[in-house]
Image (cartoon, rainbow, N blue to C red):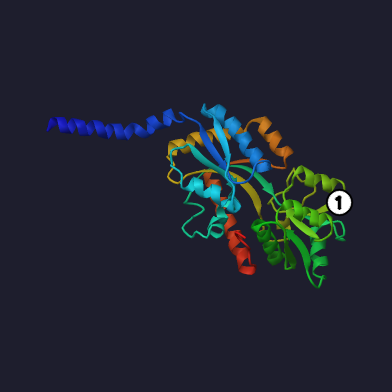
Amino acid sequence: MTLNRRTLLAVTCALAISPAVHAQAYPDRPVKIIYTYAAGGPGDALTRLLAQHMSTSLGQPVVVENRTGASGGVGTMAVARADADGYTFLLTTITTVVQIPMVMRDDTFDPVKSLTPIANVSMQPLILIANQSVPVNDFPSFVEWSRKQPDGVHVAVSGPTLEVASALVNKGANIKMVNVPYRGAAPAFQALLGGEVKLYFTTPSASTLEFVKQGKVKILGITSAEPSPLIPGGEPLIKHVPGYVQDINFAVWGPPGLPAPIQAKVNDAIRTAMAVPEVKERLNSMGMAPAYADAAKVVKTTQHEAANIKRAMEVATIRYGQ
């Protein structure tokens, strides 16, 4: 009987210390970050830059896998279904995660509970740009001018995020922007340059800002709560559209149930990476602002974005997964 009790005690102690031992040993093999879109864009560059610097802190290679499809749904669901052992993570936009139930037609996916939020890493506001034929140079003047257009003002959209943007601005400013869908950002921007549409919501890439400098397009406003140093002269639309903020936040998640010690270790590696001057400089050159924040901020931003989508769907039909 004594032997059984001693054995039980030993097993109990082993189970009690195993998470601590596991955390100390972690990671003992390469870590993978899944990025949900194709290679070559700013988000992909951000993921690879972060992985490079996280490798230094974690002492193991951090590899990037581009898992595309279903507007980010394929890669996101792969992480949501992965083992919670700390070797598979997700980097994508918070908007992508919020849209999963609509894109994947999966009501069981919860943007807050179906993944483990780790940290926010970067933020881009959207900018509302106009063709030079639009005879105004700021948003209040645009509102007055647009209300005089009997058929509304055509705005290019290349995905549900931009459809949400136009729906919220329409509602908040009491104007009529008419969505014209395009398959991707490049044809949408070309349509703006060619005058097929008058407006386009986009991110502040170096090429976009160069067109602004050349006078080929003009900025009417930005969607962040505060002015951005990345967009000189861009006035936040919230000054004229009450409550409207719609940033593109890139964040890192793990699978659901990820142990707290592993969350903390990966979070530390991310925070250290984001503090490296080279990382800030590279991101700024791509029109992205470093924006490290902890898991609680990721949850708060997720809830805000979900509220934006709900408001937009009350006044417009948003095309998910088409």
Q: For mark 1, give the secondary structure.
A: loop
Asked if residue 274 can be seen in this view, the reply is: no
Categorize mark 1 by other alpha carbons within 10 Å: few (<14), some (14-19), many (20+).
some
**Quadrant of the frame with the C terminus:** bottom right
Q: Kindly identify the residue that appears in the image at 86 percent across and 56 percent down.
A: 132
Asked whether 12 or 36 is in front, the reply is 36
Asked if residue 248 can be seen in this view, the reply is: yes
Indicate the position of residue 63 as horizontal and vertical percent values: 56, 34
Q: Kindly identify the residue that appears in the image at 51 percent across and 35 percent down.
A: 266
Asked whether 103 or 146 is in front, the reply is 103
Q: Kindly identify the residue that appears in the image at 81 percent across and 73 percent down.
A: 150
Q: Is residue 291 left or right of residue 261?
A: right
Indicate the position of residue 223 as horizontal and vertical percent values: 70, 53
Asked whether 154 or 166 is in front, the reply is 154
Indicate the position of residue 260 as horizontal and vertical percent values: 44, 39
Residue identifier under label 1: 216
Indicate the position of residue 161 as horizontal and vertical percent values: 65, 56
Which amino acid, by three-letter code, is at mark 1? Lys
Q: Residue furthest bottom?
A: 150
**Quadrant of the frame with the N terminus:** top left
Q: Is residue 276 above or below residue 199?
A: above
Q: Kindly identify the residue that appears in the image at 71 percent across and 52 percent down.
A: 126
Q: Is residue 307 left or right of residue 193?
A: left
